[in-house]
């Protein structure tokens, strides 16, 4: 039994790789199904414990125990670009949402402020029934239970769940996004917040996703027959998307200077990055404050062990960034090197410590993100049309544990 992603409430059944070797194992097992099988069956929602038509790699990908580049490369190598196209296109949604939020960070801050405001003014009627699975809408209540018990929902179920929350139950999308962010084992600031906005009709202005009872019945093999679903999508009235920001330029690692390597749930396979091989790592640290629950703790512990072995440097858990900086100073190293932290709590924690310290906090941004994010300014298609070029440009080392 594992604690929930947030550390509260138990997850009863767990099926999501949280170490690099488990992620590589899951990828190897899923690879034969990632071609035409995936394209044909990926939207079939077969119920708790039966999601074999999809990879269930998201908890590992979200923490970069395994990277998008590695997964894409393996799938294309086995199936060829044509048959792999659907899986790779889905994979690139993660890249797209990350790149998009990097260029509109105020959406993340506004979402959190909205949640605080909505909670302070009193949770809306129907909220308690929704989060306790007492709405009487069979599919919604079952997905709610599945989410609480496993920390996971199939992508198609997530779309229906969010749509019913917003348009049938008429609850604020922000509170729904907060609930799933708290419970998903793959909880991700970009994919979660922006997918909820997409369902609500706020991403592509006015284009909402409306759950349909007949479709739910068909896609779930008749397991559900939901009654009373909204038949129109009343798109929330909100200010349009904020203007584009430039992509944040991180301080790059100094390859000459001794470093303390900081591992966070944002990137847990830095040892696979060619640019970091020669780094003079004196110690590897992780902060408990960067882990939002048991899943993060397990994944970071795995990352620490690998990085410590790879760079032959001792590993250490500390409470927070202040303690990490103190360790750097004690060790006499002038830089902390970590994986790039996209918009979210880890980035905020790093930013808060940058002021007032002489230790350089450097971030390594992967070439995959560097290449893809400039195409993540508009709709997904602007990125999708560059997928072949992105795959060509990715110089990928063979997968290794
Ligand atoms: C309302 C809503 C909230 C979501 N919140 C999250 C979240 O917090 N964290 C998260 O990782 N994903 C989120 N997603 C995206 C998606 O549902 C999950 O990544 C996917 O279900 C994970 O299952 P899988 O690994 O079996 O996917 P597969 O179908 O096997 O896909 C392979 C990989 O492609 C990526 N991917 C596939 N579909 C999407 C998508 N629509 N958006 C982004 N990446 C995708 C994921 O990395 C996934 O692991 C959300 C989707 C919706 C509709």
Image (cartoon, rainbow, N blue to C red):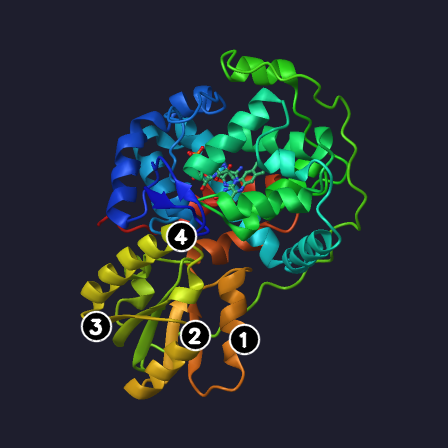
Front-most of residues 338 and 374: 338
Q: Is residue 240 above or below residue 55?
A: below
Q: Is the Cβ of the residue at disc 4 closer than 8 Å to that at disc 2?
A: no
- In-front residue for pair 161/354: 161
The CA distance from mark 1 to mark 4 is: 22 Å
Residue drawn at x 71%, y 54% as measured from the top left: 114
Residue 68 can be seen, yes or no: no
- Residue 321, label in figure: 2
Q: Secondary structure at mark 4?
A: loop
Q: Position of residue 89 (x, y in %)?
A: 49, 36
The numbered mark, 4 or 2, whose residue comes first in the sequence reads 4
Query: How many neighbours does mark 3 have within 10 angstroms: few (below 14), some (14-19), or many (20 or more)?
Result: some
Residue 55: image quadrant is top left
First along the sequence among labels 1 and 2: 2
Q: Earlier in the sequence, mark 3 or mark 2?
A: 3
Horizontally, residue 14 falls left or right of residue 282, namely right
Q: CA gap, disc 3 to disc 2?
A: 19 Å
Q: Residues within 10 Å of mark 4 (few under 14, many from 20)?
A: many
For the point 72% across and 31% down, the residue is 167
Q: CA distance from mark 4 to mark 2?
A: 19 Å
Q: Which residue lies under the disc numbered 4?
A: 63
Callout 2: helix, strand or loop?
A: helix
Q: Is residue 388 left or right of residue 306?
A: right
Residue 209 at what x, y percent from top left? Answer: 67, 30
**Mark 3 vs 1: CB contact within 8 A:** no
Q: Earlier in the sequence, mark 1 or mark 4?
A: 4
Q: Which residue is mark 3?
A: 313
Residue marked by disc 1:
352
Q: Is residue 205 above or below residue 357?
A: above
Residue 274 occupies quadrant: bottom left
Discs 1, 2 touching: Cβ within 8 Å = yes
């Amino acid at each position: 039994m594992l604690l929930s992603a947030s550390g509260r409430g138990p997850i009863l059944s767990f099926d999501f790789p949280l170490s690099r070797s488990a992620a590589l194992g899951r990828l190897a097992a899923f690879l034969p199904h990632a071609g035409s099988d995936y394209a044909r069956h990926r939207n079939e929602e077969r119920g708790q414990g039966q999601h074999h038509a999809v990879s269930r790699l998201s908890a590992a990908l979200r923490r970069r125990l395994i990277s998008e580049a590695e997964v894409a490369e393996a799938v294309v190598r086995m199936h060829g670009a044509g048959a792999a196209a659907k899986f790779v296109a889905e994979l690139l949604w993660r890249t797209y949402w990350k790149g998009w939020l990097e260029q509109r960070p105020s959406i993340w801050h506004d979402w959190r402020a909205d949640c605080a405001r909505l909670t302070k003014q009193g949770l809306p009627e129907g909220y308690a029934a929704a989060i306790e699975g007492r709405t009487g809408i069979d599919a919604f209540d079952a997905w709610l239970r599945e989410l609480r018990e496993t920390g996971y929902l199939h992508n198609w179920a997530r779309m229906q769940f969010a749509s019913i929350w917003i348009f049938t139950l008429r609850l604020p999308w922000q509170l729904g996004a907060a609930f799933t962010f708290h419970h998903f084992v793959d909880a991700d600031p970009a994919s979660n917040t922006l997918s909820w906005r997409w369902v609500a009709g706020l991403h592509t202005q006015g284009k909402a996703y409306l759950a349909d009872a007949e479709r739910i019945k068909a896609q779930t093999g008749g397991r559900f027959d939901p009654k009373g679903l909204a038949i129109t999508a009343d798109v929330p009235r909100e200010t349009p998307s904020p203007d584009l920001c430039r992509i944040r330029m991180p301080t790059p690692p100094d390859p000459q200077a001794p470093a303390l390597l900081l591992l966070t749930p944002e990137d847990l396979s830095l040892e696979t990055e060619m640019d970091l091989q020669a780094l003079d790592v004196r110690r590897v640290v992780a902060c408990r404050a960067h882990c939002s629950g048991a899943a993060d703790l397990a994944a970071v512990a795995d990352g620490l062990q690998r990085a410590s072995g790879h760079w032959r440097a001792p590993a250490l858990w500390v409470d927070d960034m202040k303690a990490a900086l103190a360790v750097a100073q004690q060790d006499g190293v002038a830089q902390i090197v970590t994986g790039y932290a996209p918009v979210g709590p880890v980035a905020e924690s790093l930013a808060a410590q940058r002021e007032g310290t002489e230790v350089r906090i450097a971030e390594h941004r992967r070439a995959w993100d560097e290449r893809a994010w400039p195409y993540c300014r508009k709709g997904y298609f602007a990125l999708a049309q560059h997928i072949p070029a992105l795959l060509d440009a990715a110089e990928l080392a063979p997968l290794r544990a």
